[in-house]
Image (tube, helix red, strand yellow):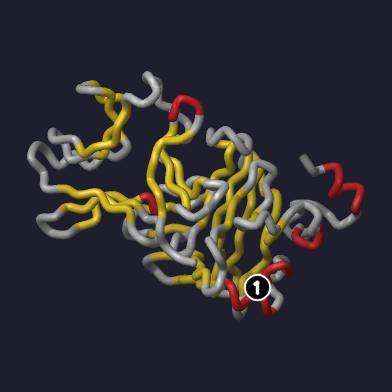
Amino acid sequence: MRGNFTLGFFGENYSYLGIWYTSDVQSTKVWVANPNAPIISTPGTHTLSISAKTGDLVISAGSKTLMRITDVKLGPNANVTATLEDNGNFRLINQVDKRVLWQSFDHPTNVLLPGMKLGYDMEMGQNWTLTSWLSNEIPKSGAFTLSWEPTQKASQRLMIRRRGQPYWTSGNLNNQIFQYMFALNGPGSQSMYNLTSVYNNKARYFSYDGNTAALPMWILTPKGQIRDINNAAAWSPEFCYGYDTVLKIITSPIEQILSRRL
């Protein structure tokens, strides 16, 4: 199932602005605009709009601006529109030249959707990295990050870091298969996800398409796991083969693996 996302406020006192699949009964958030800065105002009084002064996306309560989501600063009377695309990407577009001024896919939180990227664009100075939530209920940045770390074309891998230190690696991606992500290497998983990597002088990144998956998403959990909407693990601490002994992230004896679990 594809498309049909909802943008709205959520959480206690509706303190956060987020996006989720409309048909997801759990309303799992795939993006949060302000994970580290909850809105402080009377519940039900704040709204999202485009500033007439700058063209930015802002959250306001009456005439008072509470928070600025973007920083495009086009000036007064800018012809700008905001659109939530079918793929879950929230875009701010300059209608004069149809230029994308800002998009949520460039500011990921803890979820990787089909079409999103992990990695970096050298020309644009853009870096895409996931950051876990503090807990399942609190979207504040947690201890783990998920990044794409290519050292050369033949050596491109996912890396989970815990407070900046290497914690786990997927191993290299080769012909749609990650060296250590066995849960994704079976025929069923391979038919659900089409994995892609780009490595050139302009950009180096990882992405995927959810070919047949219902409500496709990869979630970096507060415990440093990668899971999908059904809570199935693409990787978790139980998959001890996922540790890279060459990088000395965790060695293979089970006692050492258990000692590093949260």
Q: Position of residue 212 (x, y in %)?
A: 55, 73
Instruction: Point out the image quarter for the C terminus.
Output: top right
User: Which residue is depicted at the point 66% across and 70% down?
Assistant: 178
Residue 99 locus on image (x, y percent): 19, 57
Question: Which quadrant holds residue 70?
Answer: top left
Q: SS for tag 1?
A: helix
Residue 65 or residue 100, whichever sits in front: 65
Q: Residue at x 44, y 58 (%)?
A: 120
Amino acid type at mark 1: Ser
- Residue at which label 1 appears: 189
- Identify which residue is drawn at 25% across, 49% down: 82
Outermost residue toward the left in this view: 77
The residue that appears at 73% across and 54% down in the rendered structure is 236
From the viewer's perspective, is residue 4 above or below residue 64?
Answer: below
| Relative horizontal placement of residue 50, taking residue 180 as reference (left or right) | left
Q: Position of residue 199 (x, y in %)?
A: 46, 71
Q: Residues within 10 Å of mark 1 (few under 14, many from 20)?
A: some
Rendering coords of residue 240 (x, y %): 81, 58
